[in-house]
Amino acid sequence: MHEFLFNTKVDQTILLGRKARILSELLTHIQTVPESSIYFHTHKYLRQHHFLSPEPPNDFAYWITEVLNEPVLGERISSVDIVQFRTLEELRKTFVDILQSHIEGSERFPSAPLGQEFHFMASRTYVLRTPYIAHSLEEFKEILKCVSINSLYYHIFEAKLRLENKENDFSKWFRDLGIIQLADQVERLDPYTYTLEGLRNKIIRLVEDNGTH
Amino acid sequence: MVHINDYSPIVGKPNIDELFFMARYLEGKRIQNINSTAVGGGVAEILSRMVPLLKQLGVETRWDVMKGNEKFFETTKKFHNGLHGIAVDISDEEYEWFLEVNRQNAAELTFDDIIFVHDPQPVALIEQRKYIGRNWLWRCHIDFSKPDKKIWKFLERYIAKYDSAIFSAPAFARKLSIPQILISPSIDPLSDKNKDIPEAVIDQIFSKFNIDREKPIITQISRFDYLKDPLGVIKAYKLVKKHLDIQLILAGGGAIDDPEGPIIMQQVQEEASKDKDIIVLFLPPSSDIEINALQRGSTVVLQKSLKEGFGLTVSEALWKAKPTIASAVGGIPLQIAHKYSGILTHSIEGTAHWIKQLINEPEFAKRLGENGKEHIKNNYLITRHIKDYLLLFISLYHQGEVVNL
């Protein structure tokens, strides 16, 4: 039987020294920052506020809504369905298109108050081995109960969008084991609509439903 | 003495395990912290906690304090003020003496593998790099959002020679040729200021100060200086008082080096003398338990600063699950997501509006407090700070956007 090696990850936040006060500056920077910055600003809330439900929006939407007071545009940016994207470039393009069309049709040019500019940052991710190895579904379930939330995050989110794998690591392992139904069930989850603890519990329940009580 | 495992019940064992996993990657590396004071001030406080914890994780760490005379520290005090936007005049001779003291220290110090230099005072030790190599990191603990141009130009020459510069808030990032890394400060949940204390102790401290715990209490803990806006807090309180019978606590120390401090204090005292529900407490520096109790016993905590560094008093209040209203300045927006983990305001009227809302909607206020506590637990405790430092040291040896260690 294949093993599942649990990894975990830690992030370093890089300050890019770029900031935006108005929408056109935000757009310019979104067009040119590294992919790791798009990733950072669409996943920071998830990592930092993973206990919150409902989930706050991505950084761009939060700033547009709360600082520039543009709720309609903010809602459009926040409702971009990140789970649908296979690459960060596609995600970037979607934000660019929304911002461009809004700026072209707008007569308002709101500006952030001093001190509330949008500061661009980026993530540098370090992947670490943990000593935890699952040799069976039963072991997988027990380990999943006790690994850090960073490990769950790595195998679900990082694997797919950042490393551009076809599916998350858990589903891939279940599929390799021939447990196709479980693989499909976990793959179908929209992880962005759960808190990370909620997601952990949901996956444990799905594993149990597949015969590991 | 506190042990790293004592944090397990607070942040969870998996998080402490991760620190041990990370520490393995620094085996054989020796880390040397260098700053300019052994006691007093935030940097010495964090190093005195951090260094023993790093050692317990198995990371060989030491801490050296540079030496300097009065003339040197007068100059670096001017640097400090200038970097905070206060007009200062530094002569060429003072700049030269600053460099001379750094060179004298360099001659006396021995250097380890990773040299972690804190704040501007020892920044010019980097001149040694051309002779000894090694890895050099510069950690800026102060507000760098609007530095005096001449001082910045002088310091930049030295900062640019480091491997990376580390800042506490995004607004402090500069245009630099070296990578800039965000590492926010932290609070220690096991310190007197933040540890759990029994309700009886809270009661006792409130009765010592003659404060009625039956009526809602709004509290701001901070120095009595203009930038913390205590008079703005009183104005917001008065707007709320028209509708709700509340009390206001303003507690903190004075700002010795602030010329406007005594004037502000006098005005605050005048206002307080007209209203028995405004309680002004001048606390000595050793009042950590009192501050802890005052925060825990409050209905709502305020931090209505006009300017702020990171704003660790906000972290302290949120850690105690207190609904918190704070200005959107400095590092505060990192700690509070508006209406999720607290309230961000921009005016006296807005502050008053939200005080009323939080007192009248205790369930909403409770949820904000709970979310705030979780946010601090996950992002602003000393264990996260240690993780960031370990990663900073590891990153010197591994480059790339996604690195498999």
Image: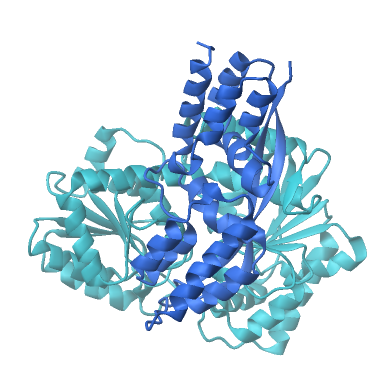
Does residue B40 appear to the left or right of B274 in the view shown?
Answer: right
Position of residue B43 measured from the top left corner of the image (x, y, whole percent): 58, 57
In front of the other: B344 or B153: B344
Q: Residue at x 81, y 57 (%)?
A: B135
Q: Is the residue A84 above or below the residue B304 in the image?
A: above
Q: Residue at x 46, y 78 (%)?
A: A103
Quadrant showing the N terminus of chain A = top right
Does residue A141 appear to the left or right of B238 in the view shown?
Answer: right
Quadrant of residue B242 within the rendered picture? bottom left
Position of residue B19 measured from the top left corner of the image (x, y, whole percent): 65, 36
Q: Is the residue A74 above or below the residue B15 in the image?
A: below
Quadrant of residue A29 within the rendered picture? bottom right
Q: Residue at x 62, y 48 (%)?
A: A161
Q: Colour of chain B?
A: cyan
Instruction: Kindly tell me whether residue B185 is visible in this rendering.
Output: no
Instruction: Kindly tell me whether residue A160 is visible in this rendering.
Output: yes
Q: Colour of chain A?
A: blue
